[in-house]
Amino acid sequence: MGKPLSRRALETLAPLDRGFYQRPTRAVARDLLGKLLIRRLPEGLVAVRLVEVEAYLGVVDPAAHTFGGRRTARNEVMWGEGGHLYVYFTYGMHHCCNVVTLRAGRPEAVLLRGALPVFGEPLIVARRNGRTGRRLLDGPARLCQGLAIDLDANGADLTAGDAIWLASDGVSCRAAWVRRRPRVGVAYAGEAARWPLRFLLDLEASVSPLRGGAAGSAGGAATRARG
C-alpha cells in the first residue's frame, strides 16, 4: 500500500497540522486510516501505516475515560488541545496511545489500534521480542510496544515533528476499503459498546479479528478502559 519510503523521504514529511485534529472525532478517526505514524527511536527511525482506530466521544461516551466530565491526572491530556498524544498504562502491563481531537475543554480522542510497518521493520520486530507476521502490530498494546510508546510520550505534540508525529505520504483510502464496526473490549459501556466507532481497512492483514466472527485480539483485551 503506497510506494516504498526511504528515511530521507520520511524525514521530509511534514506533520499533520493542528487543524486536522480539531475536527469532529469520527472524521479524524476515518481520516487517520492510511496515515503514517513516524517514530524516532534510539536505534533509528521507524514508520507504520495506520489500518485500525477507534473513536471515543468524551463526556457523552460511557466507554471514554472522560465520560460524564471525569477529569483526573491520568486523562488530563484529553482535556487539552487536539493534536497531542494521550498515553495510558493498563492492566499493570500494557500501554495504549490515543490522538486527542477537537479543542481544549472537549475531551475526545482516537485510539490507535493497528498498523503495518513501512520502514524500520527490523527495529519494530526487535521491540516485539522477535515476533513477526500479521500480529506484529495488531492491537494497541502491540503497537505501543513495537514503537516504544510509553508514558514518557504522554502529551507529546504530534504537530511538532519531534520524536513522534503523524504525516501523509499521499495515500488515500477509498471508501470501499473502510469498514465500521463496534469497538473492542468495552462491554461495560452498555449500549455504547455497539456504537460503530471502530474504523478499519479490510484489505490489511494486521486488522484485529472481529468479535463474534473470530476471537478478539490480545491487544484488544488490553483496552477495557481507554480515552
Image (cartoon, grey):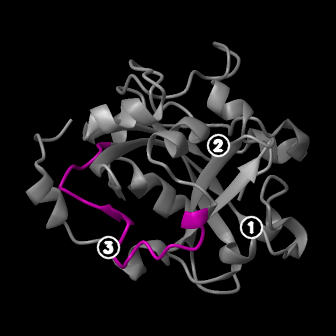
Instruction: Work out how far the residue at label 3 is from the one at label 1, CA to CA, in angstroms.
Output: 26 Å
Is residue 173 part of the magenta span, yes or no?
Answer: yes
Range covered by the magenta-colored residues: 152-174
Residue lying at the far top of the rendered structure: 214
Q: Which of label 2 and label 1 is nearer to you?
A: 1
Q: Which of pointers 2 and 1 lies earlier in the amino acid sequence? A: 1
Residue 167: x percent and y percent?
29, 62
| Residues packed near mark 2 inside 10 Å, few (<14), some (14 to 19) or many (20 plus) | some
Kindly identify which residue carries mark 2: 196
Residue lying at the far front of the rendered structure: 42
Q: Quadrant of residue 20?
A: bottom left
Disc 1 marks a residue whose amino acid type is Gly
| Residues packed near mark 1 inside 10 Å, few (<14), some (14 to 19) or many (20 plus) | many
**Can residue 113 be seen in the rendering of this structure?**
no
Q: Main secondary structure of the magenta part?
A: loop
Instruction: Work out how far the residue at label 2 is from the one at label 1, CA to CA, in angstroms.
Output: 15 Å
Is residue 204 part of the magenta span, yes or no?
Answer: no
On residue 161, the disc is 3
| Position above or below: 62 against 214 | below
Kindly identify which residue carries mark 1: 58
SS category of the residue bearing label 2: loop
Q: Nearer the viewer, residue 132 or 102?
A: 132
Residue 148: x percent and y percent?
49, 49
**Can residue 225 be seen in the rendering of this structure?**
yes
Q: Which of label 3 and label 2 is nearer to you?
A: 3
Disc 2 marks a residue whose amino acid type is Pro
| Position above or below: 18 against 60 | below
Name the residue: 17% across, 56% down: 170
Q: Which of pointers 3 and 1 lies earlier in the amino acid sequence? A: 1
Q: Nearer the viewer, residue 117 or 94?
A: 94
